[in-house]
Image (spheres, helix red, strand yellow):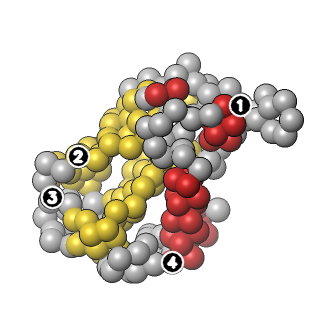
Amino acid sequence: MAAQAIDVDGRMTKTYRIARTAAVLSLALAGCLTAEPASSDTTQAASGAGGGGGGGGGVKPGRLAPASAAVTCDDGTTLGVNLSRGFQNRVEMQVVVTGSSGTASGFLEILLDDATTGAFVNGFGSWPASFVPGLSMTNLGSTVPVGVSTLDFSAVIHDGATAAGPALVVCTTSIVVVAN
């Protein structure tokens, strides 16, 4: 699906961005993006485990070892992305703006997906937003399975008040993580 989600300029397509935003909002409504204790059903759903009735089955969530990456956006803005084990072994993502070369402002969409399993791991949206040096954002997401995973990070500032607007600034990288 990743190849279909990217247009010829290397940016996410509008349909893909809208679908991703809907997924982020659905998880937020389910309580997966809050620091509140998750019920066992929410934790199992976020980790890909569970099922009807007695639950169980699926992939066991792992304890994430800290990982980080430096990201350079298409306008020269630089971000630091730090991933660590948060509450209930969920992925805590901290994004820090380390330098900004632009003045773009609009809807900020940040996403972290497991490229290995295709699962959503973390993300959020904010409006109005811009990349201001020193800005730090921290969010608690879902879990990753035991083993090695490749997580795809993207941060996009869209023109306007929603993720449906055209991308003004695009920042992407992949981060390899290990969970025990």
What residue is disc 4 on?
Answer: 14
Between circles 2 and 1, the one closer to the viewer is 2
Mark 2 secondary-structure assignment? strand
Residue at 44%, 23% (x, y): give it: 65
Mark 3 secondary-structure assignment? loop
- The crowd level at tag 4 (other Cα within 10 Å; few <14, some 14-19, many 20+) is some
The disc, 3 or 4, on the residue closer to the chain's N-terminal end is 4
Residue at 66%, 31% (x, y): give it: 40
Mark 4 secondary-structure assignment? helix
Dividing the picture into quadrants, the one containing residue 19 is bottom right
What residue is disc 2 on?
Answer: 136
Instruction: Please name the amino acid that badge 4 sits on.
Output: Lys
What residue is disc 3 on?
Answer: 132
Asked whether, in this view, residue 71 is left or right of residue 91, the answer is: left
Instruction: Please name the amino acid that badge 2 sits on.
Output: Ser
Label 3, label 4: how far apart the Cα atoms are: 25 Å
What residue is disc 1 on?
Answer: 59
Residue at 84%, 30% (x, y): give it: 54
Label 3, label 1: how far apart the Cα atoms are: 38 Å
The disc, 4 or 2, on the residue closer to the chain's N-terminal end is 4
Assess whether mark 1 and mark 2 are in contact (beta carbons under 8 angstroms): no
Instruction: Please name the amino acid that badge 1 sits on.
Output: Val
Residue at 28%, 73% (x, y): give it: 106
Label 3, label 2: how far apart the Cα atoms are: 9 Å
Between circles 4 and 2, the one closer to the viewer is 2
Quadrant of the snapshot with the C terminus: top right
| On screen, residue 27 above or below 18 | above
- Residue extending furthest toward the right: 53
The disc, 2 or 1, on the residue closer to the chain's N-terminal end is 1
The disc, 4 or 1, on the residue closer to the chain's N-terminal end is 4
Asked whether, in this view, residue 175 is left or right of residue 96, the answer is: right
